[in-house]
Image: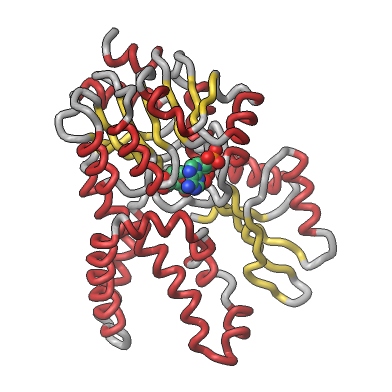
């Protein structure tokens, strides 16, 4: 068999059937994987995954070595510290991995995992790090979604020496999930991730906590913070357990990015009151306009509609029942502006562009003024 048929027709094992691992199992089933899918997870998770037909066979974590020795593609989809431990376990496993086996992971940082893989995996095993840039506020197998990777960037960070044909065939298989595969070095991945994901996460947390400095004015500030402040700090609600591992394994790049950002913040603040600051605003607007709107990136986007509503009872119910009747899920809802006795503007957020477009059509058909927010 060549690399292509080995990966698409052979056996795949997914270790850690949570949000990402479970979604990958479902997406591979719908997409290009024609071989058997084996799960390695806790017994509770395996029972559900087998019942729902997500996997063909399931094994507990203590049989990882044995499973790895027989499959063609092994996907490590546990938290980053567990991926590192599992790579070490694989290196020490009596069963051993066969030459030609492809091992990948889904961890959100790449250099530390790559170094571990290069140190632990036997020669002839191909390690290609991976990071699907898609997520959800939910965790575990119950949150698994076959469409999670649609239009998401899927970064691949191969170990040195992995043949191009292996990288290409893994890329094609993952592309069948709807993801857009991008190959880059682990170093470049972590540097970019620090700038566009890890530093923004820290800024969002700091920005929210900084309201405490207002003392007694904090509660009033929170009341007034709907709109821009709330939008900018949405990710401040992310659970820390995911971030503990991410920040621990990319601390140097995060520090470098924070220092660089601090210089920009200083320059921007120093420009206040001067017309020259306009140049920085213009540059930021031009760069922001170039960010793709139709791909999921490091930060999970929400697609937003602005709806102008009259000030009369039942308007919110009318909107929500119209959308619920078509099984469109509103992820977030917020009143942006209220004009006394006149009405206001509401922001509705959806997890996909398709949902937002369908919602726009349905609400417009009910006579509401509605537009997609860009
Ligand atoms: P998740 O929903 O919590 O799934 C991880 C699964 O790993 C759990 O369901 C659990 O399954 C298993 N696991 C094994 N050891 C564990 C431990 N010590 N603590 C917690 N779970 C353990 O998490 P996820 O969001 O899928 O994240 C998995 C990996 O994907 C991480 O490396 C993360 O960096 C990466 N990632 C996450 C996102 C995101 O937005 N969530 C995006 C891209 C990449 P059992 O209970 O069956 O053992």
Q: As displayed, is residue 96 above or below residue 345?
A: above
Q: As displayed, is residue 289 above or below residue 80?
A: below
Where does residue 46 sit, x and y in percent of width and height?
Answer: 58, 30
Instruction: Identify the residue at image location x=27%, y=10%.
Output: 2
Protein image colouring: secondary structure
331 left or right of 99 in image: right
Instruction: Identify the residue at image location x=64%, y=25%.
Output: 52
Q: As displayed, is residue 157 above or below residue 9?
A: below
Specify the farthest residue to the front.
94
57 left or right of 169 in image: right
Q: Is residue 292 visible?
A: no
Specify the farthest residue to the right.
313
Instruction: Identify the residue at image location x=80%, y=53%.
Output: 318
Front position in the image: 360 or 332: 332
Instruction: Identify the residue at image location x=78%, y=74%.
Output: 341
Instruction: Tell me the quarter of the picture where residue 95 sits.
Output: top left
332 left or right of 22 in image: right
Instruction: Tell me the quarter of the picture where residue 358 sits.
Output: top right
Quarter in which the N terminus is drawn: top left
Front position in the image: 332 or 366: 332
Q: Is residue 69 visible?
A: yes
Where does residue 279 sit, x and y in percent of width and height?
Answer: 26, 72
Where does residue 182 sit, x and y in percent of width and height?
Answer: 29, 37
Q: How many marks?
A: 0
Where does residue 69 sit, x and y in percent of width and height?
Answer: 35, 21
Q: As displayed, is residue 306 above or below residue 205?
A: above
Specify the farthest residue to the top.
1
Specify the farthest residue to the left.
161
Front position in the image: 219 or 343: 219
């Amino acid at each position: 068999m060549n690399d292509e048929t080995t990966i698409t027709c052979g056996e795949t094992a997914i270790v850690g059937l949570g949000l990402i691992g479970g979604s990958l199992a479902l997406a591979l089933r719908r997409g290009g994987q024609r071989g058997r899918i084996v799960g390695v997870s806790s017994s509770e998770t395996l029972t559900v995954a087998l019942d729902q037909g997500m996997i063909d066979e399931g094994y507990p974590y203590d049989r990882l070595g044995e499973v790895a020795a027989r499959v063609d593609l092994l996907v490590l989809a546990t938290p980053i510290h567990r991926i590192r431990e599992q790579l070490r376990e694989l290196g020490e496993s009596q069963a051993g991995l066969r030459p030609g086996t492809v091992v990948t992971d889904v961890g959100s940082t790449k250099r530390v995992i790559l170094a571990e893989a290069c140190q632990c995996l036997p020669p002839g095993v191909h390690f290609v790090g991976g990071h699907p840039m898609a997520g959800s506020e939910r965790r575990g197998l119950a949150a698994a979604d076959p469409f999670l990777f649609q239009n998401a960037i899927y970064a691949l960070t191969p170990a040195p020496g992995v043949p191009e044909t292996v990288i290409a065939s893994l890329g094609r298989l993952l592309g069948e999930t709807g993801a857009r595969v991008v190959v880059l070095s682990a170093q470049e991945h972590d540097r970019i991730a620090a700038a566009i994901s890890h530093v923004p996460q820290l800024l969002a947390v700091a920005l929210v906590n900084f309201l405490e400095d207002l003392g007694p004015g904090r509660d009033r500030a929170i009341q007034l913070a709907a709109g821009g402040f709330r939008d900018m700090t949405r990710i401040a609600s992310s659970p820390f357990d995911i971030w503990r591992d991410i920040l621990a394994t990319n601390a140097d790049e995060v520090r470098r990015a924070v220092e660089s950002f601090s210089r920009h913040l200083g320059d921007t603040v120093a420009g206040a009151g001067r017309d020259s600051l306009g140049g920085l605003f213009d540059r930021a607007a031009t760069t922001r306009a170039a960010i793709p709107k139709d791909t999921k990136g490091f930060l999970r986007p929400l697609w937003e509609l602005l709806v102008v509503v009259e000030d009369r009872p039942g308007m919110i119910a009318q909107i929500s029942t119209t959308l619920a009747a078509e099984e469109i899920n509103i992820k977030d809802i917020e009143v942006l502006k209220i004009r006394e006795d006149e009405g206001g503007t509401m922001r509705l957020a959806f997890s996909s562009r398709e949902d937002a477009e369908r919602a726009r059509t349905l609400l417009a058909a009910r006579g509401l003024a509605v537009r997609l927010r860009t």
